[in-house]
């Protein structure tokens, strides 16, 4: 994996390459979002979605990888806010996202705040509290105690509330992105990324083996079982579709598109969120075709 000085992953076209710090001349397209468009699972920079779009499936305008690992929608917005001045003319912004806001919606209000939780925020708040305790020089035994913030026995909100919360975050941050991107004239499309269990009930033999091994060392189903069902994915997609339409943002739910295009033998995922090179290849072609990009 290679990134530029700012941490943006390098994208490859058929004959050249570029990044946000070193963009090609002329108009560009941005592929924004979190770790999936960033390319976790890809075996090389040339195998990421932005690279496959630029080099094969929609090569008429260069694509820059504008994604960041583990980002929520607020972090995706901040990434654009902080680096938009480096970009040439932007023709298209495709936000390939949605999973992280929903996954993080299970956290307590104290961690979610006004703009959404972020990954590892529990550890961050713990460290900040310990720093405050040391700074106050409190006596031993009067520092942070387990459960002192009332989150140890936090009840996870019902799925309907979590979906509503995640959609509200996405809506607000998309509205802000539209304001920031308006001077560029760029068209914004929001693509709900396909979680493996939103695409099909059972994966390829390789996926079954990999997921089985991952489940032995992780608590995926305990943490995300309620959002991982196909029904949950459909409910979330329809709520996002309604919200995007209200803002005149083009929306695509990639899960049913992908499900229709593959067979049970297609090895798409290295885990339930990130693609193999084969999965990236299929999704890149479907994305270009679905959005009418050449």
Image (cartoon, helix red, strand yellow):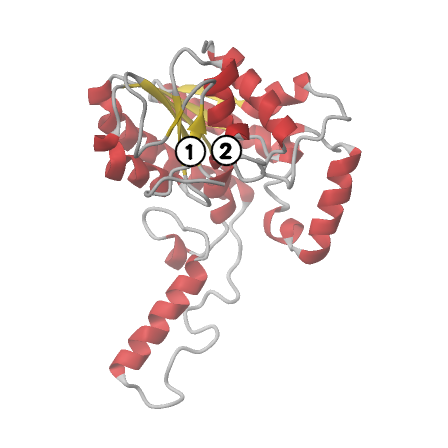
- Looking at the picture, how far across and down is residue 160, in whole percent? 52, 39
Give me the residue at 31% from left, 31% from top: 22
Circles 1 and 2, Cβ within 8 Å, touching? The answer is: yes
Secondary structure under badge 1? loop
In this picture, is 149 found above or below 174? Answer: below
Residue 83, image quadrant: top left
Q: Closest to the observer: 187 or 276? A: 276
Numbered tag placed on residue 10 in the rendering:
1
Give me the residue at 28% from left, 16% from top: 26
- Looking at the picture, how far across and down is residue 35, in whole percent? 49, 40
**What separation in Å lies between label 1 and label 2 (alpha carbons)?**
6 Å
In the current view of this chain or complex, which residue is farthest to the front? 15
Q: Closest to the observer: 282 or 148? A: 282
Q: Closest to the observer: 265 or 24? A: 24
Query: Residue 79 vs residue 278: left or right?
Result: left
Give me the residue at 76% from left, 37% from top: 206
Query: Residue 208 vs residue 160: left or right?
Result: right
Give me the residue at 47% from left, 14% from top: 58
- Looking at the picture, how far across and down is residue 104, in whole percent? 48, 48
Q: Name the residue under label 2.
A: 45
Secondary structure under badge 2? helix
- Looking at the picture, how far across and down is residue 159, in whole percent? 55, 42
Residue 41, image quadrant: top right
Query: Residue 227 vs residue 162: left or right?
Result: right
Mark closer to the chain start, 1 or 2: 1
Q: How crowded is mark 1: few (under 14 residues within 10 Å), some or many (20 or more)?
A: many
């Amino acid at each position: 994996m290679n990134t530029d000085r700012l941490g943006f992953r390098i994208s490859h076209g058929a004959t050249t390459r570029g990044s946000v710090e070193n963009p090609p001349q002329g108009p560009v397209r941005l592929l924004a979002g979190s770790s999936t468009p960033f390319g976790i699972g890809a075996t090389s920079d040339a195998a990421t979605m932005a690279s496959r779009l630029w080099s094969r499936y929609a090569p008429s305008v260069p694509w820059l990888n504008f994604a960041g690992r583990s980002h929520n929608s607020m972090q995706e917005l901040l990434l654009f806010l902080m680096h938009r001045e480096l970009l040439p003319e932007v023709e298209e912004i495709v936000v390939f996202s949605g999973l992280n806001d929903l996954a993080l919606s299970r956290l307590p209000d104290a961690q979610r705040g006004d703009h959404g939780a972020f990954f590892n925020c529990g550890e961050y708040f713990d460290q900040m509290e310990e720093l405050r305790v040391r700074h106050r020089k409190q006596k031993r035994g009067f520092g942070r105690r387990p459960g002192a913030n009332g989150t140890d026995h936090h009840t996870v909100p019902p799925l309907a509330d979590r979906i509503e919360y995640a959609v509200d975050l996405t809506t607000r941050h998309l509205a802000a992105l539209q304001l920031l991107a308006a001077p560029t004239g760029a068209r914004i499309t929001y693509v709900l990324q396909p979680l493996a269990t939103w695409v099909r009930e059972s994966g390829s033999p390789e996926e079954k083996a990999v997921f089985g091994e991952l489940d032995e060392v992780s608590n995926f189903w305990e943490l995300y079982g309620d959002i991982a069902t196909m029904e949950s994915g459909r409910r979330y997609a329809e709520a996002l579709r309604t919200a995007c339409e209200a803002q005149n943002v083009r929306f695509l739910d990639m899960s049913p598109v992908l499900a229709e295009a593959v067979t049970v033998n297609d090895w798409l995922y290295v885990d339930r969120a990130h693609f193999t090179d084969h999965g990236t290849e299929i999704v890149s072609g479907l994305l270009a075709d679905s959005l009418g990009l050449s």
